[in-house]
Image (cartoon, grey):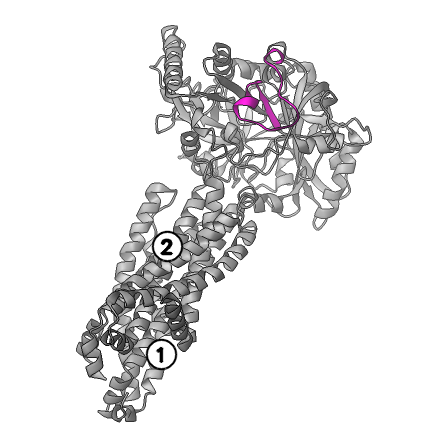
Amino acid sequence: MTMHPILAALRKHKAGVVLISLQIALTLAIVCNAVFIIGQRIERVNRPTGLDENNLFLISQQWVGAPGGDDPAGVEKLDVMQREDLAALRNLPDVASVAPSNSIPLLNSSWTGSVSIKPGQQLGDKSGTRTAYYFTDDQVFPALGLRLVAGRAFTAADVQHQGARDQRDRPVIIVTKALADKLFPQGSAVGKVIYSDGSSSPSTIIGVVERMQIPASGSWGNDFTWYSTLVPTRLDSNFARYVVRAKPGRLDAAMRAVPATLYGVNPMRVLDDDSVKSFADIRASAYRADVGMAILMGVVCLILLCVTAAGIVGLTSFWVGQRHRQIGVRRALGARKIDILHYFQIENLLIAGVGVVLGVLLAVGLNIWLMTHYEMTRIPALYVLTGVLAMLAIGQAAVFVPARRASNVPPVVATRAV
Amino acid sequence: MFTYYLELALRSLKRSPGLTALMVLTIAFGVAASMTTYSVFRAVSGDPIPWKSSKLFVPQIDMWGPNGRGSDGEPPDAMDYNDAVTLMRDHRARLQSAMYQISPSIVPADASKHPINVSGHAVYSEFFPMLDVPFLYGSGWSTDDDTQRAAVVVISSKLNQKLFGGSNSVGKTVNVEGKDYRVVGVLNDWNPQPRFFDVVNSGGFSTGVEDVFLPFQRAISVGIPNDGNTNCNAVPTESGFVGLQHSACVWIAYMAELDDAAAVIAYKQYLDGYAHDAQQSGRFGWAPNNRLRDLPAWLDNQHVVPSDTKVSLLVALGLLLACLVNTAGLLLAKFLRRSSEIGVRRALGAPRMAIYAQFLVEAGMIGLAGGVLGLLLTGVGVASVGWVLPKDIAALARVDISLLLITLLVAVIATTLAGLYPTFRASRVQPAWQLKSN
């Protein structure tokens, strides 16, 4: 079939053609970017933290009337209280292991600083590498289910304690593989020395964990998401967090047993609804905004695609009705049903073709605009290409029903008056 | 004539129910998606204190110098203890307050109840009049209480309900962090969103309630530590909360009320003079780099409106645009199909304006129907944002009269706009040509 009659007919409906291509272009531009946003969010939400997240929960609690952590006697008293809590929790029948920790991945409460291979680097200097610290003890590996890939884990002899706002040397630390590779690109980091927060006293890396996310899940942590540092030190203040691994399948039982146990050790403390939280809950609240955004974008895409498909059906139906007689004439002159069907299909392909070309430009434009104003990255060509193919397919699917109705117009229509 | 056009429109719409339904649904979905995201956007971008926001200012002092600045050259967004207290002592604004976030525990008088944890702020007495904080009972404390570090407390109505059953508790005692405080005031419901007086720590929005307010110097002297963010450019040389107070770490929010342009200029000069003196004395090794933003500019600078909210609104508006283009296409097809009818009307003497009126009424009716359906869908949408958005933000989105009106207006106006070109084309129909061709 030659294109000429189709093009000639389209010229008669310039405005309609322009509108429908414009709509296809808009749809393509919005859907591409929305699907790209969805893809990014899903990728973020699905990245593993490096922990064994099952059977894991966190206790955040605060003592009342406890000594301040500013004087050595108070620190010692607080440390005794913390060790009493840890011992009581470790004795629970449903608990496998417990470690104190100032935070946990995705909790969005972090202690960050910078580490450097040179001593005395000021924090303001950009030469250091940002990191998030986890202050914990020797039980952190079984409690969090971290995987050691080099060196050794902490032993009880490594563990110190300090007031939460005190500054103390950190003779041994463990870092993530990502941080180790950043600091020591050539060769193993185990046994090497680094300096934290501009200190001039060295910290020896004794082990490397495969992966451990920082507590910050927001975009401000994007630069150092995998740069965690573990310090074998209990922090003593009127506030303490414990990470607890329950025995397999005993998570609920272990979580239920916590308040009574801790009140039993010392009733003068605050434990509220949020004090005992499963890791699944922590994960869900950290990524709630991302999941929400993905759902919202999904709903918008769905509506948009339905509207566009319905619009194509509606407009083509009208054109079919309008050209009822002409179709009859063509049929009477020998055109087969399949010719009529193809006519409308090709017509749609042409219109959609113009639409997607315009749409690709719009999609890239929108992406660039989003990149300059918001945190977006460049949209991969694959997304746009898939969008183009999907748009063309939707156009063909939408045009099929009215086109088939057109192909069923009997030739005898040609002889009738309107 | 209008009723006649209404009747004509109704008849025309009934003639093709499928197409009419399609257009109404398109408008309804487009409007509902935009209005739902708009309700969220409106909630988070609203002015928390519209009658006064242009008089409230947040000073920033560049005490860290070039190394501590962000990539945009901005000084720290909070203050260290030394600067905050000096600014309070100099007292150059009409009203001002330094403040820091606290999270003390409260021991109920009833010994059988467990202690509870509350959040709040340590503030100066001028905090309450400056922010027009509403009181249910009593009032804020006096300037004397500030200087004497009095053991007084202002509590929220929620905490008052919990501790005193909602009765007037002014003069009664609350145990905060193991020490007794006299209640001087109980707030009426006060939950400004965003938490404009301390956006650095609240991140803007908060589901919690500010339950206690203590005098700033009192909280410092009894060592109630800050519960908010602490940012340091160097490790404090001394330990503990006292060490933090002596350090250059920033953890204190500051707000001042400046009532006119002259006061703003004078305050800016004061800040620059302060930084200049610090440069002279050798404390700062750099030229003054201060900021003095009013509240709206500060909220904007702190990106209080989440970018997700803006992107969602943008995408939803794009959806509405696509829906309108769709409707315009359908209307065009529909109107032009009635060329012969138009031809007859024009031949019988109807002016172009009459054709315009007839078809715009038809478009407006579709818009109205779409708007009504869109209202229902917007209601569903706003009710379900709680499922997908973070709680602190979703809780703010609500349907009210103005949202209902905007929804209807947007639907009708947008559809009428979409109908403009099709109507223009319809009015251009040549009567003679149409009559001949039949």
Q: Amino acid at mark 2?
A: Gly
Element type where label 1 sits in the image:
helix
Q: Tell me the distance, in whole angstroms, between the alpha carbons under discs 2 and 1.
A: 28 Å
Q: Is residue B162 left or right of residue A281?
A: right
Q: Nearer the viewer, residue B69 or B261?
A: B261
Residue B320 in sight here: yes
- Residue B142 lies within the magenta run: yes
Badge 1 density bin: few <14, some 14–19, many ≥20, Cα 10 Å:
many
Q: Amino acid at mark 1?
A: Pro
Q: Is residue B98 above or below residue A48?
A: above
- Between residues A286 and A372, which one lies in front from this camera angle? A372
Host chain of mark 2: B
Q: Which residue is mark 2?
A: B318
Q: In the image, residue A220 lies at what x, y percent?
A: 45, 36
Residue A361: horizontal and vertical position, in percent?
27, 55
Q: Position of residue B415 (x, y in %)?
A: 37, 60
Identify the residue at image location x=37%, y=21%.
B261
In-front residue for pair B166/A286: B166
For residue B309, what is the image quadrant? top left
Q: What mark, if any, has residue A402 been given in the picture?
A: 1
In which quadrant will I find the N terminus of chain B?
A: bottom left
Residue at 18%, 75% (x, y): give it.
Answer: A8
Residue furthest out toward the right: B112
Q: Which residues are magenta?
A: B120-145
Chain containing the residue with disc 1: A
Residue B384 falls inside the magenta stretch: no
**Which SS class for mark 2?**
helix
Placement of the C terminus of chain B among the 4 image quadrants: bottom left
Q: Are marks 2 and 1 in contact (CB under 8 Å)?
A: no
